[in-house]
Image: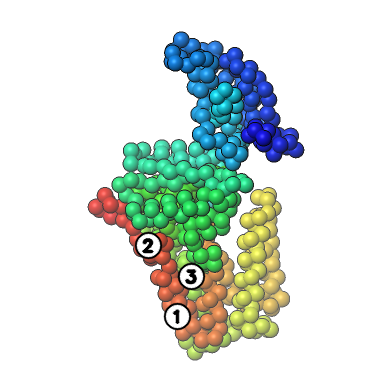
């Protein structure tokens, strides 16, 4: 069975696929593509125009048929064509032209149907003073945005086509004079060895890169800002772009990604350090405050001054639950509110936040189910969790606070300190291809810090 017949049989129940016979440059050809990915009338008109404008006289004298020479200039011939290669080209939105004698398959870039959104402002990372462009769903557009941001000749790009059942493009970018050679070698070898994997999610990509699936701290940092991706490249890190994913994946993730942004350098240096200091304070508040409340109320009340201890005792009068239980229940309610506000439509999300944050909180206090002081502490904790750079980076911080909360309920203030020591020890043990998570990378040509 011919390869064209195999392709026809495979997609015989797919109305979006077409394979048609036409005359092009005076020779019978077959064209095949997906209707939803190309603008067929404009593409065919463009091919006919290129054939008419071709200079037939420049065909090599060795060619018996000058039409073959003209056809070969319309696209790139697929070497060793098979069903997998043709499907990968078709699913990428290309047009395949087939002609016999000799049997040739041409991969032609057609006029596509616009299926991607234009360059817009970032949706998840607000920029107050800097470029307002954000990455979108198209891989080529994302690479172009990053090239515009860097504007250097040392930027290198490696492209991969991954997956057999659902092919998807992947691009690896790095600065030749900045990248760590061992890091580049590790990532390139793992991607080459797993090109047959279908990378349709970040979990699949993490597994392909050899990361542990149950790691609390993500191994890569995601951003939708070209300036942040460019800064990571200048540090010697690697940037990955996955087609149909509007973020840049920065390898490896480091501790500085939690509270440092390249956009901070657009402010005076004093304000830059103040902003970063506030982010560090937000991380510490998120980790310590709930556990410290439980420790001082239920285990170590003698640490407090007598006036403060009496005020806390008065606020908790009539509360039927222990401090640990009321704190845990209210934290779970706040997590539900955050998850719901993210998933709901924007027209309903703010309403739910108001209902959950104000009305529900006031009703819980008036019903004497929790103390009013706990409402203040957890509100400050929730606000502090948003001070972390990037939503993905806030997830491990939100999880770590439950560790300090449990230890504080058992050992008091000593449990809070023990939780911080355990968290620091865990973070110090994390490495990505030999690069520690607590490492601060400095660009090789940056002499002033």
Side of 416 relative to 340 (left or right): left
Would you call the spot at circle 1 few (<14 residues within 10 Å), some (14-19), or many (20 or more)?
A: some
Disc 1 + disc 3, Cβ < 8 Å = no
**Where on the picture, by quarter, is residue 10?**
top right
Q: Which mark is residue 278?
A: none
Q: Residue furthest top?
A: 57
Side of 186 relative to 308 (left or right): left
Disc 2 + disc 1, Cβ < 8 Å = no
Mark 3 or mark 1, which is nearer the start of the sequence? 3
Mark 2 or mark 3, which is nearer the start of the sequence? 3
Residue at image location 51% in from the left, 65% down from the top: 212
Mark 1 or mark 2, which is nearer the start of the sequence? 1
Pinpoint residue 158: horizontal percent, then vertical percent. 43, 43
Q: Residue furthest left?
A: 447
Residue that mark 3 sits on: 285
Could you tell me how far apart the alpha carbons at marks 3 and 2 are, in whole angstroms? 28 Å
Pinpoint residue 299: horizontal percent, then vertical percent. 54, 87
Front label number (1 vs 3): 1
Residue at image location 59% in from the left, 85% down from the top: 313
Residue that mark 1 sits on: 417
Element carrying mark 1: helix
**Where on the picture, by quarter, is residue 272?**
bottom left
Residue that mark 2 sits on: 435
Element carrying mark 2: strand
Could you tell me which quadrant the N terminus lies in? Answer: top right
Pinpoint residue 174: horizontal percent, then vertical percent. 38, 47
Would you call the spot at circle 3 few (<14 residues within 10 Å), some (14-19), or many (20 or more)?
A: many
Work out whether residue 369 or residue 20 is closer to the camera in this orientation and state it: 20
* Residue 284 against residue 12 in the figure, above or below: below
């Amino acid at each position: 069975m011919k390869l064209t017949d195999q392709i026809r049989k495979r997609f015989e129940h797919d109305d979006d696929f077409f394979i048609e016979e036409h005359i092009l440059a005076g020779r019978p050809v077959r064209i095949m593509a997906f209707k939803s990915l190309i603008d067929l009338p404009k593409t065919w008109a463009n091919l006919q125009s290129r054939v008419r404008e071709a200079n037939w006289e420049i065909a090599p004298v060795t060619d018996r048929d000058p039409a073959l020479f003209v056809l070969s200039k319309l696209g790139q011939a697929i070497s060793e064509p098979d069903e997998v290669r043709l499907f990968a080209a078709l699913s990428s939105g290309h047009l395949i032209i087939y002609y016999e004698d000799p049997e040739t398959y041409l991969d032609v870039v057609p006029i596509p149907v616009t299926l991607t959104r234009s360059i817009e402002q970032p949706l998840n990372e607000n920029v107050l003073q800097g470029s307002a462009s954000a990455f979108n769903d198209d891989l080529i557009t994302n690479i172009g945005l990053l090239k515009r941001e860097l504007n250097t000749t040392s930027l290198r790009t490696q492209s991969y086509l991954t997956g057999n059942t659902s092919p998807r493009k992947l691009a690896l970018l790095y600065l030749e004079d900045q990248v760590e050679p061992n890091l580049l070698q590790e990532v390139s070898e793992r991607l080459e060895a797993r090109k047959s994997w279908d990378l349709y999610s970040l979990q699949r990509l993490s597994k392909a890169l050899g990361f542990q699936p149950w790691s609390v701290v993500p191994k890569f940092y995601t951003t939708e800002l070209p300036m942040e991706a460019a800064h990571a490249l200048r540090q010697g890190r690697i940037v990955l772009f996955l087609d149909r994913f509007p973020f840049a994946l920065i390898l490896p993730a480091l501790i500085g990604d939690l509270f440092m942004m390249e956009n901070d350098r657009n402010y005076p240096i004093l304000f830059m350090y103040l902003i970063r200091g506030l982010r560090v304070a937000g991380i510490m508040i998120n980790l310590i405050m709930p556990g410290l409340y439980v420790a001082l109320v239920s285990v170590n009340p003698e640490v407090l001054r007598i006036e403060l201890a009496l005020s806390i005792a008065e606020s908790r009068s009539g509360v039927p639950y222990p401090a640990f239980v009321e704190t845990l229940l209210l934290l779970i309610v706040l997590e539900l509110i955050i998850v719901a506000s993210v998933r709901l439509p924007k027209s309903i999300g703010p309403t739910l936040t108001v209902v959950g944050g104000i009305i529900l909180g006031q009703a819980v206090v008036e019903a004497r189910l929790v103390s009013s002081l706990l409402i203040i502490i957890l509100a400050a904790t929730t606000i502090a969790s948003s001070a972390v750079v990037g939503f993905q980076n806030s997830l491990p911080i939100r999880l770590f606070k439950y560790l300090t909360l449990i230890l504080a309920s058992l050992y008091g203030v000593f449990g809070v300190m023990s939780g911080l020591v355990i968290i620091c020890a865990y973070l110090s043990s994390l490495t990505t291809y030999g690069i520690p998570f607590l490492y601060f990378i400095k660009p090789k040509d940056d002499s002033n810090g």
